[in-house]
Amino acid sequence: MNLTTVDSIIQKAESEGLFPGAALGIYLRDAPFITRYHGRHTFVPWSRPVDRDSLFDLASLTKPLATTLAVALLLERGELELEHNLGDFWEDIPPEKARITVENLLTHTSGLAAWMAIYERLSASREEKRGSGLDEACRIILREPLCSKPGNATLYSDLGFILLARMVELASKKGLWSLVEKEIYAPFGLSKITVAQENSGNRQAFVPSGYCPIRNRVSWGEVNDLNAWAIGELPGHAGLFSNLEDVLILVSSILNTYLGDEGDVFPIGRDIIRHFLSFRSETEGNGWALGFDRPAPRDSTCGQFFSKKSVGHLGYTGTSFWMDLEAGLCVVFLCARTFPFDSPGSRKKMKAFRRLLHDEVRRALGAI
């Protein structure tokens, strides 16, 4: 396979300042992993090169790779159901909110707003807090009005996945991070997937994700997302960090479980994985599987050559993964688009870059 053009596309994006470095992983069914590392952790020429130990802020890849998998695990155990609703977990909430189901939250059809500045409303700053602010964050969310009736429309929502994290916690009697780390990642040998370690004194492996004007510092070893930072640990919508290989192992294992190739190795069974990846919502125009995105009808970020039978997700920092369930293909891309600063221009450029990257990967595979 000749990846010269793919490498050139990544190097051009680096030279134009879209990101200082990146990691690309490709898996094709029954073939060895292909991994490519480019650039450095920052634009400073003497900063650390991106390598197999570099830990990227996965941002919203947390949604499918932590929260969704936790829900799938609890569903398989009978500890949670897609039909469970907010009223099963919180008392004294308005009836329209009480009817919001786990399925609504996973498919972004809950009617909840996309985002709100929870970090401004928590009772104590992140530095002052002891323990997680997840419960308080959920109570703040539950006081807000809905944007639409549950099930009537699709609106991608961080808030819904924060609620899901708390529901996982209440159903399992374990925090989301404790559950996925001990029962999904560790048994599968995924030791590099982690959460923020800003106070550990060992941040060298972490790729800085950009300057934060609220915190007045570069986010380095701490999560870029302000709500995730303020709530603490792993609040469902963001918070995971990982190197390339562990993400590639995880998504390829999900794919192989779907295809029936993993046997009893993966902690979640094939029937549940197939249900989550194949799910179709009854909400008109909804393009989501359960916790996983599908290619957009036009100008999809996975390019023009991934089949309609594909699922994946994007992360705000520039991360992404796409799995073509028909071709048996996974593509993982990790970078820090938000370094040193986030901007609308870089978001637009990243969208075009993602399409081009995935198209050239497919061309290099000779699959078109």
Image (cartoon, grey):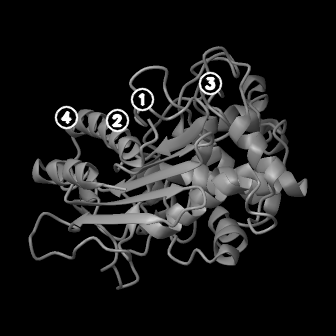
Q: Distance between the residues labelled 4 and 3?
A: 29 Å
- In primary-sequence order, the first of circles 4 and 1 is 1
Question: Are dots 4 and 3 in contact, CB under 8 Å?
Answer: no
Q: How far apart are marks 2 and 1 (CA)?
A: 8 Å
Q: Is residue 253 left or right of residue 23?
A: right
- In primary-sequence order, the first of circles 3 and 1 is 3
Residue carrying label 1: 304
Residue carrying label 4: 345
- In primary-sequence order, the first of circles 2 and 1 is 1
Q: How far apart are marks 3 and 1 (CA)?
A: 30 Å
**In the rendered view, would you say 107 is above or below 53?**
above
Q: Is residue 236 among the parts visible in the rendering?
A: no
Dot 1: element: loop
**In the rendered view, would you say 42 is above or below 186?**
above
Q: Residue at x 65, y 14 (%)?
A: 284
Along the line of sight, which residue is nearer the eye, 209 or 292? 292
Mark nearest the camera among 4 and 1 is 1
Question: Are dots 2 and 1 in contact, CB under 8 Å?
Answer: yes
Mark nearest the camera among 2 and 1 is 1
Question: Are dots 3 and 1 in contact, CB under 8 Å?
Answer: no
Residue carrying label 3: 111
Report the amino acid beneath label 2. Arg
Report the amino acid beneath label 1. Gln
Q: Distance between the residues labelled 3 and 2?
A: 29 Å
Q: Which residue is drawn at 40% across and 35% down?
A: 301
